[in-house]
């Protein structure tokens, strides 16, 4: 009886390892995507207002490739010479499922 109980406990323990590894990978990828997006937003903040533009790049971290799409657009009803909307979207694939994370930032013209 004790051996059977021990076998069940060991089986449960070894079944938890793959799921915890997968959860760790997911968290690591989401954190990497967040860092990439925040770094791109900081670059946009440092860019002169007149030079703001969109771009598409790729960045590899570990075994994951992240596609970084940056877009800069006007905001309806607001003067585009004073304020614009910057959006950074990071896409990656995780276990054959597409994942996306996006951040937005309103950028103000400091030289007006």
Image (tube, rainbow, N blue to C red):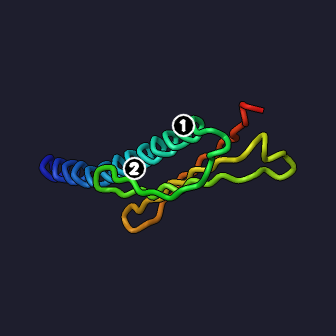
Crowd tier of the residue under label 1, counting other residues whose Cα lies within 10 Å: few below 14, some 14–19, many 20 or above: few
Query: Residue 92, image x and y in percent?
Result: 43, 59
Query: Residue 19, image x and y in percent?
Result: 32, 53
Query: Residue 6, image x and y in percent?
Result: 17, 47
The front one of 20 and 94 is: 94
Residue at left offset 84%, top offset 46%? 78
Residue at left offset 70%, top offset 53%? 73
> Which element type, helix, strand or loop, lies under badge 1?
helix
For the image shown, how many numbered marks are present on the structure?
Answer: 2
Q: Earlier in the sequence, mark 1 or mark 2?
A: 2
Label drawn at residue 107? none
In the figure, is residue 73 to the left or right of 61? right
In the figure, is residue 43 to the left or right of 84? left
The front one of 37 and 49 is: 49
Q: Is residue 105 above or below residue 111?
A: below
Crowd tier of the residue under label 2, counting other residues whose Cα lies within 10 Å: few below 14, some 14–19, many 20 or above: many
Residue at left offset 19%, top offset 49%? 10
Classify the position of the C terminus by image quarter.
Answer: top right
> Which element type, helix, strand or loop, lies under badge 2?
helix
In the figure, is residue 14 to the left or right of 106? left
Asked where in the image residue 89 lies, by quadrant, the reply is bottom right
CA distance for labels 1 and 2 = 20 Å
Per the image, the residue denoted by label 2 is 29
Per the image, the residue denoted by label 1 is 42
Residue at left offset 65%, top offset 47%? 86
């Amino acid at each position: 009886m004790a051996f059977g109980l021990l076998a069940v406990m060991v089986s449960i323990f070894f079944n938890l390892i793959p799921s915890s590894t997968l959860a760790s990978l997911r968290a690591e990828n989401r954190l990497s995507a967040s860092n990439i997006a925040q770094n791109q937003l900081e670059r946009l903040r440092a860019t002169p207002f007149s030079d703001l533009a969109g771009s598409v790049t790729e960045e590899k971290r570990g075994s994951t490739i992240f596609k970084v799409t940056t877009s800069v657009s006007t905001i309806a009803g607001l003067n585009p010479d004073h304020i614009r909307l910057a959006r950074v979207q990071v896409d990656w694939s995780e276990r054959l499922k597409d994942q996306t994370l996006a951040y937005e930032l309103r950028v103000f013209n400091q030289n007006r």
